[in-house]
Amino acid sequence: MSAGIEDFVAQCAAGLPQAVTLLARTVVEAEPGRRDCVTVPTPDLEALLTGLLSGVLGPSGSLGGAITLDELVTASAEVRAPWLISTTGRSGMAGPTTTRVLEGMRGNLWGMAPAEVAPTIEPFVPAAPALHPFLAAALTGLLARRDGAGASGGAGGLPTYEDRYSRLLNATTAADKQLPPEDQHPERLAYCQLALGNVKNAARILNDQFNVNTVTTSQWIRMVCLAAQAPCPTPREIGTARAFADCVQPSDLGTVGDEERSVTRLLAALWLAGDIWTVPRPVPGGGLPGRDERLPWIPDAVLAELVRQEVGFLFGRSARGDREDLQRFGRLFEHEKPTAPAGQAGGPSASGWWRRRRRWQQAAIGTSAFALVAAGVAVPIALRTPCGEGLRYNGDAKACVGVDIDSGEFVSHDPLAPLEQWLKKDNQDLDDTVAKENASRRPEDQVYTVSLVFLQEMTPNDSTSLTFAGVRHAVEGAIAQTELANADAADHHSRIRYRLLLANFGTHADGEQDAVAEIRAAAKAQRIAAVVGIGQSSKNAKAAIRQLADGPGDHFTVVGSDITDDAIGMTDAGTAINGFYRVVGTNSQEADAVRQYLQTSKLPHSRAVLFEDTNQNDAYVTSLGVAFGQLKPAETMTYEGNDEYPKRVESLLEGHQQSYCGVPSDITYFAGRGTALRSLLNVLKTDSCHRGDVATIVTGDDGTNLIDPATALPYGAFNYRIAVTALAAEDIGTSLGAAPAATLKRLRDQFAADRVGAAGMFTGSDFQDGLAIVSADAVGVLSFAVAKTNSLQDQAHDDPGSIGADLSSVDCGTPYAGASGYIAFDPTTHNPVNKAMPIVFVHRDGSAEWSKEVAWPLGKATDFEGGHGCP
């Protein structure tokens, strides 16, 4: 048995030598994060407990009377309840058996007093003892194995887990009702709800107490810690990461406030930490964690970070004078790497959590136990982190951020998981092919691979207008174009091949610092050549671009695929960020294209109104507002957008309703996110302004996020049409030129080929929002530049980062015929020159209608195919 498995078995046994012997024979595949590796057969577990409890069971046992193991298992719900094993507890469940069991356990070694359990972490230890962790887990496990329903439906007619904890909840509720409000114990009700798997109900109870003036912060923390001692009924085949996700992501939690959601996450993290039969996670370098590589309370870095984050959030929401106790509580979850005592190389220190662990060891049978004790409950050594190689958990982003080297998930139940696995196979097949081909090549003809990192907000949520569908489309486009680039490289006998790695910096790029750090850390081993994608414009996205393209250390070429804020590619001095290019036009170019389009279209545009989002944290909307302001609207109506609070945005927009409808306009410019536009339509749907006329609302490329045939737009008396300056067109014939049309057809054909082996992916409808097309162009322009220069292929063998050195040569003389149109970089700004902007109309049913018309910032197309170059 390996040292890691030995530690895990000792953790499960919690200091009982007899349990170690049995568990060592039955533990299976100690895979990190698994909760079902302890598979002791019921007869063996019963025999072990009978032997361990020989002095307390039976006619002469210390429990007083002929108590059998079955009766003890039945009573385990109350025996585990901290307030009932204490000397002042009251059962509330009639029956002499339970009463004798409780009275016997109170004076027995198996029931540990609070001072023995965790003497160094006051004032947060609930004032109640704890049952020995192995005994608690074993008795609860046997109770849960009783099949059936109802008091007589279990094995042999014995009560079941659900029956006993339902009765405990009812008894606890009834007991509380007999007390005055100031003497009631809501934390006990939360404990019972949690034991029954009702996480939301338990969190609501505790959240209500958070706002009770007579409850101090320290008292509230003790309430949470006591409730978190409840057993977990989640099926053991469900791993820790998914169990946590199931706790905090049910559909009905979307309606609760931020504070209650935070309490839910805090409670779930503490609760799941109480399972001592969870396999520890690996530590850097491989293997199971050593005894000195654990956090003091929750040894899993992810859950500990969640606790710190939620405690910090609640600290910010609290107005109490004693709220510093929250900070003190949060600091208990900080990592403290033990140092070796003198004379014990690599051993643990005698301080901090080690002292707490030793006290438990001495109190519990006197043998070595590798379980920690937190708030009176045994905490497992480590829980699974859902983050794979190249990723780290980021509390602000609430997801794994960094570069996904082994194609793991960014969040639990990741919607992108099928694509991640597809890409993993693509990269493995490429590596195998290259190795096979190189076996027969001369050294100077060897083929080599470099990695392109596709960085994006891979984990969007309700606080952003971006959707998982949009992210999926963008990833599909990057994958398909990488496959085409490798096919072209093979056909043209190029020495270079491309691997694609996905990277996440979280919603709004909140985890950009961690993501950039992980990309840099992986650069050498993964031969990272360039970063593409980026996604929506934000301050954090700009920071990521600067760090990657022009920051300290190694620089990477960064090619933006759908980022349109004018200033995001500029330094503070007003010059282009060295190494940053983009394949789409800027917001100013979108506004110029709109002006040119309105002049040539038949749409009336004599009077215009501008809705302008003033959210300074959103670079896209502020830039678009400035750009649309140059079109000289007759009136400007401002609001501060916030995708996380659409109802608040609606209330702000309602303030402009009377003014907007008082003087109808021909054109409404909307400088905001698609989610805010939906809010405006919701405000206007019952109004009669513009009745008989059709209001034309013109917005920027974020409006394509409204394209979703499954989600209709708000519609009523207000009659409207939405015109969006799109980044790319699904199919507009040869309006962009013959060569771009051929590139687009080839991309569509690649999607069709991939679709054969990919259920639900690479579909034709995935082109509608244009994200797949521009992502493909970001990859395509890189491979195009490399293919032009043979010397660059040789240079990139030793310096993958040099792959983007020749992007400046993609100019008006030698443009790239992308699927979204010709791309020629301006040498001063690195923006595409006169980039085509197709106009798409979004209908109220969420469908898209491509107008077959293209807007050009300069008023007409640049004649690249005629050889005339840029104007």
Image: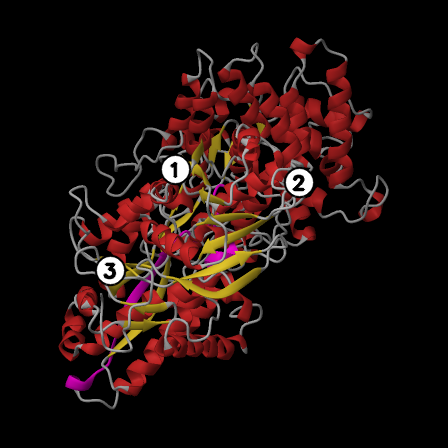
Q: From what the image shows, is residue 536 above or below residue 525? A: above
Q: Which comes before the other along the chain, label 3 or label 2?
A: 2
Is 493 included in the stretch rendered in magenta?
A: no
Question: Residue 100 versus residue 573: which sits nearer the camera?
Answer: 573
Mark 3–mark 2 Cα distance, whole angstroms, equals: 48 Å
* Kind of element beneath mark 3: helix
Question: Residue 164 versus residue 776: which sits nearer the camera?
Answer: 776
* Kind of element beneath mark 2: helix
Q: Are marks 3 and 2 in contact (CB under 8 Å)?
A: no
Side of 237 relative to 574 (left or right): right
Query: What amino acid is at disc 3?
Result: Ala
From the image, state whether disc 3 or disc 2 is nearer to you: 3
Query: What amino acid is at disc 2?
Result: Thr
Side of 472 relative to 556 (left or right): right
Q: Furthest residue to the bottom?
A: 440
Query: What amino acid is at disc 1?
Result: Leu
Q: From what the image shows, is residue 112 above or below residue 672? A: above
Side of 676 relative to 824 (left or right): right
Q: Say the numbered circle drawn on residue 295.
A: 1
Does the rendering let one see residue 383? yes
Q: From what the image shows, is residue 342 above or below residue 793? A: above
Residue bounds of the magenta highlight? 443-471
Q: Say the numbered circle drawn on residue 523.
A: 3
